[in-house]
Image (cartoon, grey):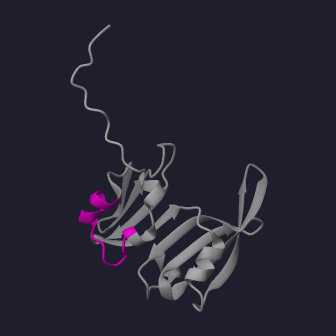
Amino acid sequence: MHAARNQTPPIEREAIAKVFRADLVEPGKTQLKDLPNLLGKPVRHVQETGHHDFYFYDLGEGASMDATVSVRAGVIEYVSYLCSESLSDIHKRFSGEASTQRSISTGVNGMTSTLTQVVYQSKGRAYVYEPRTYRVRACVAWEPGKKFEELGF
């Protein structure tokens, strides 16, 4: 038997995915320099132009990139991330706010599906959900006052 050496146990912390919300990052206000403290180290960085960058984060178990952060001129433009919020909770949170909905057709290897997107323009939030189950799959946050269509998805 070998005696245990001075091994430091890994620091256990709650996975960011469990606590991640768009509210951690304030598009239009949060600076690029603040991202490491909020989300950690990105798994990938792509510079689209001299003033526009994308940072991709793994917020879960390392299997995929779960969040994308768009940065323009050092300020967060928008953040999109996989989520599993309840559509009814979202409707309650934004009760009384104007929203628009549209259907999005998707297809892979001959299989097609339709998703629905609901956009709360004045709040800078959009959600993509499955219309059969009402499960929200993706969330997007941007600076309130900007138009969703201007984000360049």
- Residue 133 drawn at (x, y percent): 74, 65
The quarter of the rendered structure image containing the N terminus is top left
Q: Is residue 128 above or below residue 149?
A: above
Confirm whether the magenta stretch covers residue 32. yes
Q: Residue at x 59, y 92 (%)?
A: 96
Q: Residue at x 40, y 64 (%)?
A: 69
Magenta stretch in the rendered image: 24-38
**Lateral position of residue 19 relative to residue 126, left or right:** left
Q: Is residue 100 above or below residue 79?
A: below
Q: Is residue 152 visible?
A: no
Confirm whether the magenta stretch covers residue 135. no
Residue 130 placement: quadrant: bottom right
Looking at this view, name the residue that lies furthest to the left: 6
Q: Residue at x 59, y 87 (%)?
A: 95
Count of number-bearing discs: 0
- Residue 80 drawn at (x, y percent): 49, 66
Looking at this view, name the residue that lies furthest to the top: 1
94, 153: nearer the viewer: 94
**Lateral position of residue 61 relative to residue 29, left or right:** right
- Residue 139 drawn at (x, y percent): 54, 68
- Residue 8 drawn at (x, y percent): 25, 31
Residue 34 placement: quadrant: bottom left
Residue 3 placement: quadrant: top left
Q: Is residue 22 visible?
A: yes
Q: Residue at x 38, y 50 (%)?
A: 44
**Lateral position of residue 11 relative to residue 135, left or right:** left
**Lateral position of residue 133 relative to residue 68, left or right:** right
